[in-house]
Image: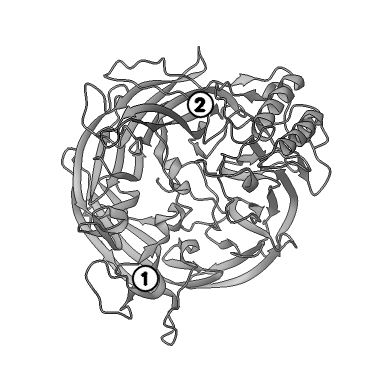
Amino acid sequence: MKNLHLLGLSLSIAVLLAGCGGGGVSGNNPSNTVSKPALKQATSNAELEALIKKQMLAIYGTTRPEIYPVAYTTGSSNSAPDSAAGSTQSFSSTNTQETSVDEADRLKTNGNYLYTAALDKPIVRIFKANQATTQAVAELPLSNDTNTVLTGLYLDGSHLVALAEDQQQVGIWDGWFTPSYWRNQQSQVHLLNVADPAAPAQTSKLTLEGQMISSRRIGSTLYLATRHTPTLKGLIEYPTTDTEAAANRDLINQATLSDFLPDYRVNDGTGQELFAADDCFMTQYNGKDDYQTSIISLLTLDLTSSNPIPQGKCFAGDTETLYASSEAIYLATTHYNYTTAQVADATVSNTVTNYDTAITTDLHKFSLANGITYQGSGRVNGHLGWQQDLKPFRMSEHNGVLRLITYTGSWSNRTASPASLYTLQENTATQSLDILAKLPNDTRPAPLGKPGEQIYATRFLGDKGYLVTFQTTDPLYLLDLSNPRDPFIASELQIDGYSDYLHPVGNHYLLGIGKDAVAVAGGDEGRGAWYQGVKLSLIDISNPAAPYEKEKIIIGKRGTETGVSQSHHALTTLQQGNNLQLALPVSLHESAPSYAPSGPSTHYSWTQDELYRLNINTVTGTMQALPPIVGTVKNSADIYGYSYQWPYDRSVMIDTYVHYLHGDKVISQAW
């Protein structure tokens, strides 16, 4: 941190205690006066330094014994396959949310070679695909640091990108929710030349101060969002005495701007600045109880450059997830605002204090037309859920309109609808994202979900939206978004179980992947049902007003899991004529437990890890299961045996062959 120029950053306002306001709309003529979290451009180094110090002093300069690390924030159709020179093969690509926007994963292919990231070592391995076999042709270690792990790969022609980060070395109470998780973290971008896959060579290494939040690739441009939590040597994270707070104030007041800002380095060189002064923005929150300060960088890298240098913008406000269309990036942040009110309690003789949690999500839009350009901000009620990988699926941009589904069912004054749908559009005059419509509203009051239900899968496809909520059964809502100023529920389908992920199958079907469930009093987490095996549900949506479950498959018994429920990248598909080949890794539980089964609550023992395979006729909707490819089988002598690799298993299909990456081993055979 040696540069005094304005570097890329944003000041993250408290996630747990930030005052964020709120707002809403009703009817088909919604008010657009909801408080906007607009970004303000930093005018000078002095202004930026003063703001950072103000926030640092608010957090570390007073005794805060009441603060505990419990804040909230955390961290499609198939994409077009990468081309391979001289290749005429058909092959699958990483399953992504948007067709033209690639996402990092641990397995990539160009139809001739497989590029894999090792699970527990910073090593890239390359395999030659030869029909029903694969041959290891190269292994390239990227670091000697055993704490460094690879988090994903991108493949762009002869350019391979390997993302890496340091494993978290934090205490048991630390995590996404605390400054300790983000402090002193670094992210690495390794750029490799794989023109000759048997002799890969690293061309450069970029090190960024900060933890990687998310990334995307569009064409030959890589987009990165990182978070850096500034600290000072000797700073006491939770000052509990006046002496500790005074020592923190002295450290903060004596620091300079360069002490707070992140650097980047090329090939382990000296630190370099990221941004010019007019690239940096600050938030304009009114919150007084800020919990942590973070520096957010939104960067681009030109993968075709011989000396790629990060460029981009920065903004004030924490970021938990990134959604990218081919034209824009949206960064979203959830805030909690706790307020109190005295209410009468009939069970006691006086009033009691009721804590009401107002939850809002801020959205910042950046255009990708010419580099990265800030376009505007907006705010909606609710949050984006708890599962990090599924949060981007709550958002979608179509014809310049952002569609967004939030969860509001945890509010103390919850309404009949646990979910809300918003449509927002950029207002260039005010640099804001104005709310066009919201569901439910006064004109269309039908709820999205029932009280007590939670949001599971969401998916936007063209001018349609699909939403799964669940408590005892799985209501699938079909949303008509053709008029973004007047969206409506086209239909609702009640079926057993629930879906974590929804995938389009041809033009007339939607595949839900999740769990079967048996309705019973109590059940898992008191939700009125016991989860069972993995469920594949093929929904006929050819008539949006009357969808129905055409076919279903239940895989395994209670305890069976699929990696698709944790990451959509675990699903692989390849269209061959009218046949959609589909594969997903499964941790199969079918072995009888040591005790006598006692109904739907019985948890069966692990049997094996496998790649489940399926053919779906996209015209008739017929599903045909194929024999699975077995990865690891339980040792009959090991009563408590279990495999933990299944969430990271992946696969690719090349022509009429499939290659199953189980752990770091590739298993190949004819489809």
Q: What residue type is labelled 2?
A: Gly
Q: Residue at x 44, y 62 (%)?
A: 655
In x, y percent, where is residue 556?
30, 69
In x, y percent, where is residue 142?
71, 59
Which one is in front, 153 or 515?
515
Residue 496 position (above or below residue 4): below
Disc assigned to residue 670 = none
Q: Which residue is drawn at 51% across and 36% down?
A: 16
Which corner quadrant of the image does residue 127 belong to? Answer: bottom right
In x, y percent, where is residue 455?
33, 44
Question: Cα distance, mark 1 to mark 2?
Answer: 46 Å
Which class describes the residues within 10 Å of circle 1: few (<14), some (14-19), or many (20+)?
many
Furthest toward the left, the residue is: 546
Q: Is residue 277 visible?
A: yes
Left or right of 328, for residue 553: left
Residue where numbered disc 1 is placed? 588
Q: What residue type is labelled 1?
A: Leu
Q: Total of numbered circles in the picture?
A: 2
Indicate which disc, 1 or 2, sits on the residue closer to the N terminus. Answer: 2
Q: Which residue is drawn at 73% across and 58% down?
A: 201
Q: Can residue 261 be seen in this view?
A: no
The secondary element bearing badge 1 is classed as strand
Which one is in front, 36 or 287?
287
Q: Which of marks 1 and 2 is in front?
A: 2
Quadrant of the snapshot with the C terminus = bottom left
The secondary element bearing badge 2 is classed as loop
State yes or no: discs 1 and 2 in contact (Cβ < 8 Å). Answer: no
Residue where numbered disc 2 is placed? 19
Left or right of 513, for residue 179: right
